[in-house]
Image: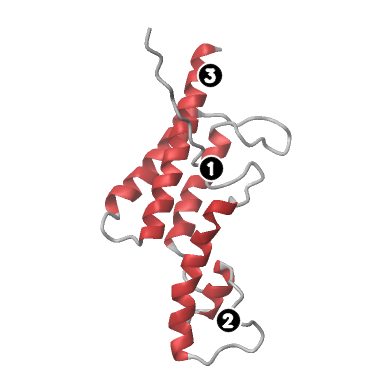
């Protein structure tokens, strides 16, 4: 028989500890760079932080002018907020009492909500936002299928 070779690529953005992987750190830098250049055009450079240091998204959003005491949330924060309960519903995160909240239909609902968000924002996202949402959906769908297969086998 002819054997086909399969290449598996880990496309997850985050490590098991929840930290952004090294190869995706540029996404943080790309988000803060345009914001810094816009604010730099209207304000003199800050003395506290040299321009050669990359700022975190929190720092760059603080430098943005805001209508209220806080800057408005970004699209990435919205997508992350919608995705947050999925880890609980997939059973990947345990409750403080050690119990699992695995509920695959609820996980599927939140994945579907992210897909609706993706469909409704076509043509309105930056490359970074689009890539983040595509990667997030890919990872969540893959994990959902893995959990579904585990449930049907066990």
Q: How crowded is mark 2: few (under 14 residues within 10 Å), some or many (20 or more)?
A: few
Q: Where is residue 53 in the image (x, y as percent from the top left)?
A: 61, 75
In space, the residues marked 2 and 1 are separated at their CA atoms by 37 Å
Task: Give the labeled residue for mark 2.
Answer: 51
Tell me: residue 86, above or below residue 40.
Answer: above
Marked residue nearer the N-terminal end (2 or 1): 2
How many callouts does the rendering have? 3
Q: In which quarter of the image is residue 34?
A: bottom left
Quarter of the rendering occupied by the N terminus: top left
* Of labels 2 and 3, the one closer to you: 2
Give the residue furthest to the right.
97
Query: Please, what secondary structure does the residue beneath circle 2 have?
Result: loop
Q: Position of residue 139 (x, y in %)?
A: 47, 39
- Please tell me which residue lies in front, 29 or 66: 29
Residue at screen point 45% across, 64% down: 74
Tell whether 151 sits left or right of 123: right
Res 150 label: 3
In space, the residues marked 1 and 3 are separated at their CA atoms by 20 Å
Quarter of the rendering occupied by the C terminus: top right
Res 101 label: none
Give the residue furthest to the top.
1
Tell me: residue 150, above or below residue 138.
Answer: above
Q: Which colour scheme is used?
A: secondary structure
Residue at screen point 54% across, 34% down: 89
Tell whether 146 sits left or right of 15: left
In space, the residues marked 2 and 3 are separated at their CA atoms by 50 Å
Task: Give the labeled residue for mark 1.
Answer: 85
Residue at screen point 54% across, 32% down: 90
């Amino acid at each position: 028989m002819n054997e086909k070779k399969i290449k598996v690529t880990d496309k997850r953005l985050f490590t098991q500890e929840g930290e952004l992987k090294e190869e995706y750190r540029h996404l943080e830098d790309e988000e803060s760079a345009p914001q810094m250049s816009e604010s730099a055009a209207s304000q003199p450079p800050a003395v506290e932080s040299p321009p050669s240091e990359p700022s975190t998204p929190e720092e760059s959003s603080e430098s943005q002018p805001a209508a209220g005491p806080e800057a408005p949330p970004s699209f990435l924060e919205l997508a992350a907020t919608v995705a947050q309960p999925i880890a609980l519903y997939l059973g990947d995160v345990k409750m403080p009492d050690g119990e699992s909240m695995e509920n695959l239909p609820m996980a599927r609902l939140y994945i579907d909500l992210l897909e609706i968000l993706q469909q409704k924002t076509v043509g309105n996202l930056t490359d970074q936002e689009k890539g983040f949402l595509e990667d997030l959906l890919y990872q969540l769908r893959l994990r959902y299928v893995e959990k579904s297969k585990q449930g049907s086998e066990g």
